[in-house]
Amino acid sequence: MPNLIELKAIKDILECKFYVPAYQRGYRWSKQQVVDLLEDIWEFAQKNEMKKDEFYCLQPVVVKNMYLAENSEIELIDGQQRLTTIYIILSYIKQNILPKAAATFSLEFETRKGSEIFLKNLNEARKHENVDYYHIYSALENVKEWFESKGDETSVAIEIYNKLLNQTKIIWYQINDNIDPIDVFTRINLGKIPLTNAELIKALFLKKDNFGSDSKKEQIHMKQLEIANEWDFIEYSLQNDELWYFLCNGLEEYETRIEFIFNMMAEQINMEFEEPIALKNNEHFSFLVFSKLFKAKEKRIKQEKLPYHKSPIDELWLRIKRYFMTFEEWFSNRELYHLVGYLVSVGMKIDVIKQETEAMTKTETIKYLNSKIKDSIAKKEDIEEWSYNSDGRKIKNVLLLFNIVSLISNKESNIRFPFDRYKKEEWDIEHIHAVNSEMPNDRKHRYDWLKAVYDEVDDKTLLDKIKSVIDKDLVFEDAAFVEIYSEILAAYGDNEDVNNISNLTLLDAKTYRSYKNAVFPIKRKIILENDRKGTFIPICTKNVFMKYYSDDIKQMTFWGNDDRERYLVAITETLKEYLPDRRDESERG
């Protein structure tokens, strides 16, 4: 039997007898936590426009039926702190302000014999009997102080009481009778792994009520198994970082990544309701949306007396699968992978792309994606006028697109741009020719620097000077090293500081840190070494340091004006479909 999941109003649990087992710690809520709960309910009660079905939602409560001989108690596995606080609030209202208020549920702590009696008669004289009673009575004093601070206690109590009973709901998660509650408690509390939206939604989908009567047990079991297996396949696929970082930028972490799909669907489904859920900032928003959808569809089935095959489960599960299958199709198609991946990387939401291309053919989708890419590049601006200091984000996007279009253009290649590495390895724009090259300070760094330059220099006089400094171990003598360092920069460093796109390329943070502001020959050497080791170097970055874009490749020791000009031509030619046409602009002007 699968776990049971549903929303319960506080009024629906007033007759429950809760048993708090010994494996739980005692009541420990602070004054701030008690006041925060009261303030949240009070703020909700004061809303001017309250929708008919609107409610305040508390965190999940995890329970299990105990089936004792004398009575049926409910083992409270998680949520004890919240329910105890609600008990204290309701008890205070009944005992001190509204004596005709309904009696609340009962709580009994396994480790505190007689605790049920203490809770029914919260007595200051007994608060020092044990630490649990002390904290419970302290919470009562916090509740009393809060009501007194509001002035008219009676009217405030009526508002709080009504909203707490009728429009405050808990997510009721009842585990299977065969599951060990201690294992569940350990997972949720000791492991600090709360129930996720995905787990709550999964319980909704696997409820046996979704699949017809008990007489169809085998059919129910097979359908549950089918959904569970497909669920696991989707989650397993999304755990592949190549797919995951294609779909999103990884800014938000998910315990289970299928929740990413549920969140997108929930926002869309919520807009379809006549009265959308006004709890978008609630961390269980997606669960609440799916729960409402299930209830609405189940209500319609009962009203219209529809047969089992009209159950909402198949329709809803198919909708989820179609979401995933669309993403999987885009991921598998090399052109769509790169176009969609670029747009997601520069900030466009994958669900927006999906919604806007829903009814399009593949050709129409590609046309749409290209138009959105064109929109992502600033209009009426020459990219060569952008500066590293003020236009870094725009330059980074153009260089990313330059790499992507270069890959797409080669129809014979199966190389794909690794969006996962681009996002995880902190790739950014870096100078090809170093601006204000940083002089090495320690002996080893200076030695390595000179050795790297020596392997690239073709000037015999300079080679002899470098060799002399190395052989005579003068690298730590500042005067000698500064002299040779200055000569190398004068010969190969290019005195012009260039901060525009013609002197910038994409590079990961680790490679950049390995050379920082080194001169071109050292950068080239390190990048080629990394490439030989199998480190991914963006194709256009590698082309820059191999000088594939340059006309003159006789020298490989500096990145000069001619190199920059040819590089800029390569960028503008490759991206001409997306960049503003300056001729058209001038003609219109």
Image (tube, rainbow, N blue to C red):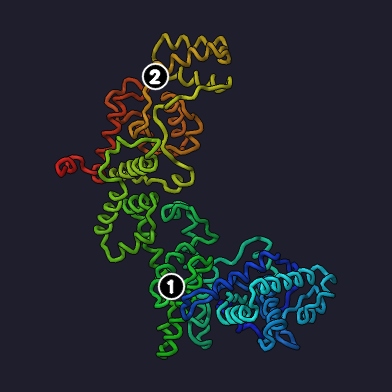
Residue 371 shows which numbered tag? Answer: none
Q: Secondary structure at mark 1?
A: helix
- Give the answer, above or below, for where 570 lies relative to 120: above
Residue 66 in sight here? no
Residue 190 in sight here? yes
Q: Secondary structure at mark 2?
A: helix
Which mark is nearer the camera, 1 or 2? Answer: 2
Identify the residue at image location x=43%, y=30%. Answer: 528
Identify the residue at image location x=38%, y=20%. Answer: 495
Q: Residue at label 2?
A: 492
Residue 139 spot, x, y in % from top left: 72, 70
Identify the residue at image location x=62%, y=62%. Answer: 193
Circle 2 crowding by C-alpha within 10 Å: few under 14, some 14–19, many from 20: many
For residue 453, what is the image quadrant?
A: top left
Please name whichever residue, 179 or 341, is drawn nearer the observer in this view of the structure: 341
Which quadrant: the C terminus?
Answer: top left
Q: Is residue 237 left or right of residue 156?
A: left
Q: Could you tell me the amino acid type at mark 2?
A: Tyr
Residue 305 spot, x, y in % from top left: 42, 91
Please name whichever residue, 366 or 275, is drawn nearer the observer in this view of the structure: 275
Q: Could you tell me the amino acid type at mark 1?
A: Trp
Q: Residue at label 1?
A: 317
Q: Is residue 326 left or right of residue 517?
A: left
Circle 1 crowding by C-alpha within 10 Å: few under 14, some 14–19, many from 20: some
